[in-house]
Image (cartoon, rainbow, N blue to C red):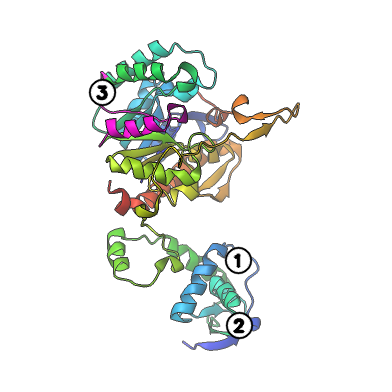
């Protein structure tokens, strides 16, 4: 299992540490750090090309999220134009250390038929587009996705009470494995699931969320607490904790995930 | 080095022990049960534990009356304090060679989960097949507005974006 650390395209300013993008601060403090797997949101990095370049160059593997969740937070965006720009970005920036690009899974705003049209635009420029199944698509569509994307990466969501119940993840994974699909569970951070369901890939922003509260730790354990004046220090320490979590789950599941 | 047996009620945990070990007690108890008490508890001359707090709690859990101890009477007060921390700290610096570990674990017939090793096998045959009837959509949670106390499905509430709680700033050139 590879855990992709998300939200690294963010930044912060605080009294004692100064104003930095996270990636800049991490590399300033740890210039030789060998980052493993990161996930960025196109929604944010489209306006920060230098930050994106740095993240891309320092990541062993990178996933790019469409930023579709930003649409769901009420931001007004022309989805067709946004998708064309996303496709253009993919065309310009694709390289071998980018593992894939998540589709525009805005089913609940524009409906699945339109989502399929947007997927087509993206698939015209790359064969690394990752479809994201939501329950509105129905179970037959999940099965079709596994057949159509046999041998490739597909995604489901890991947000509690959203699409799949905790006890059903293994069932979905078992079906996907039948078609040799690699499964990414978006936003899956729950230790209980990470310890029992061998997804090939997941992403987690819990290292940043911990930082909001000035806490350092991983896998549910807080080891240190800091004041808000040291937010970037906390971000750095939590990123390093996140890397330990990456190592832990990669090693734990490597004989099952074989990737 | 002398190993002496002490009654469990004759030794006392160090009350400012900064190491949180409750999660490990069950595994250590299993280890003592399976392999015997092979690593003595180190105590000072007053019977206060220097190293071995987890073994002490495991012994309590197992109902042992006496445990093997070593009295660190050659160490000063400061050395005892430092050793108590150092003994725990140095183990954090070790790592597994997972390749060799897999080989070692493979031959064992003992259930190593009893000693804290994760079960890394999935019995796919026991996992139910995905069918229309086996997939049961999650129901939405009901939330209560903290201001007007209106109760509704969670999707009708605006979610707080945890990302934006971190102050977003423009790219620094």
**A115 sits to left or right of A97:** right
Residue B121 percent location from the top left of the image:
36, 57
Identify the chain of the residue marked 2, using the numbered disc in the image.
Answer: B
Q: In the rendered structure, the residue with mark 3 lies on which chain?
A: A
Please tell me which of labels 2 and 1 falls first in the chain: 1
Report crowding for label 3: few under 14, some 14 to 19, many 20 or more residues within 10 A (C-alpha).
some
**Local secondary structure at mark 2:** loop
Tell if the residue under mark 2 belongs to the same chain as the one under mark 1. yes
Q: Is residue B169 above or below residue B32?
A: above
- Residue B26 in percent (x, y) is at 53, 68
Q: What residue is pinned by disc 3?
A: A126
| A14 in relation to B19, above or below | above
Residue at the front extreme of this rendering: B133
Instruction: Quadrant for residue A147, please give it.
Output: top left
Camera-side mark, 3 or 2: 3
Residue highlighted by disc 1 = B17
Which element type, helix, strand or loop, lies under badge 1? loop
Q: Nearer the viewer, mark 2 or mark 1?
A: 1
Q: CA distance from mark 2 to mark 1?
A: 17 Å
Whether residue B125 is visible here, answered yes or no, is yes
On the image, the x and y values in percent for residue B83 come to 51, 70
Residue drawn at x 37%, y 36% as measured from the top left: A38
Q: Quadrant of residue A186?
A: top left
> Mark 3 vs mark 2: same chain?
no
Magenta segment, which residues? A124-151
Where residue A120 appears, as percent x and y from the top left, is: 31, 18
Q: Which mark is residue B45?
A: 2
């Amino acid at each position: 299992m590879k855990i992709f650390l998300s939200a690294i395209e963010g930044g912060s300013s605080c009294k004692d540490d100064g104003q930095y993008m996270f990636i800049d601060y991490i590399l300033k403090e740890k210039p030789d750090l060998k980052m493993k797997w990161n996930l960025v949101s196109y929604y944010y990095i489209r306006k920060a090309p230098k930050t994106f370049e740095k993240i891309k160059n320092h990541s062993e593997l990178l996933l790019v999220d469409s930023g579709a969740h930003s649409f769901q937070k009420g931001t007004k965006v022309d989805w067709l134009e946004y998708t064309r720009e996303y496709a253009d970005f993919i065309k310009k920036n694709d390289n071998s250390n980018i593992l894939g690009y998540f589709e525009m899974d805005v089913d609940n705003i524009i409906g699945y038929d339109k989502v399929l049209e947007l997927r087509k635009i993206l698939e015209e420029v790359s064969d690394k587009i990752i479809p994201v199944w939501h329950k509105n698509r129905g179970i037959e569509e999940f099965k079709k996705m596994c057949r159509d994307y046999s041998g490739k990466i597909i995604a489901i969501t890991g947000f509690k009470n959203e699409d799949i119940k905790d006890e059903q993840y293994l069932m979905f994974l078992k079906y996907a494995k039948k078609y040799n699909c690699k499964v990414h569970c978006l936003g899956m951070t729950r230790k209980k699931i990470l310890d029992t369901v061998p997804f090939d890939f997941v992403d987690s922003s819990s290292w940043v969320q911990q930082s909001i509260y000035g806490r350092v730790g991983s896998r549910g354990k807080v080891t240190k607490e800091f004041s808000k004046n040291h937010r970037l220090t906390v971000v750095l320490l939590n990123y390093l904790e996140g890397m330990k979590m990456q190592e832990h789950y990669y090693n734990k599941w490597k004989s099952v995930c074989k990737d | 080095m002398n190993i002496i047996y002490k009654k469990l009620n004759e030794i006392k945990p160090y009350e400012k022990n900064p190491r949180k070990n409750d999660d490990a007690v069950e595994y250590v108890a299993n280890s003592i049960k399976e392999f015997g008490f092979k690593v003595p508890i180190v105590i000072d001359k007053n019977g206060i534990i220097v190293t071995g707090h987890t073994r002490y709690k495991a012994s309590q859990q197992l109902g042992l009356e006496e445990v093997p101890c070593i009295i660190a009477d050659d160490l000063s007060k400061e050395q005892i304090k430092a050793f108590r921390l150092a003994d725990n700290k140095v183990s954090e610096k070790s790592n597994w060679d997972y390749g060799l570990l897999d080989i070692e674990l493979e031959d064992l017939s003992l259930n190593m989960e009893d000693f804290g090793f994760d079960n890394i096998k999935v019995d796919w045959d026991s996992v139910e097949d995905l069918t229309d009837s086996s997939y049961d959509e999650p129901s939405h949670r009901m939330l209560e507005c903290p201001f007007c106390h209106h109760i509704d499905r969670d999707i009708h509430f605006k979610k707080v974006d945890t990302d934006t709680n971190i102050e977003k700033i423009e790219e620094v050139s």
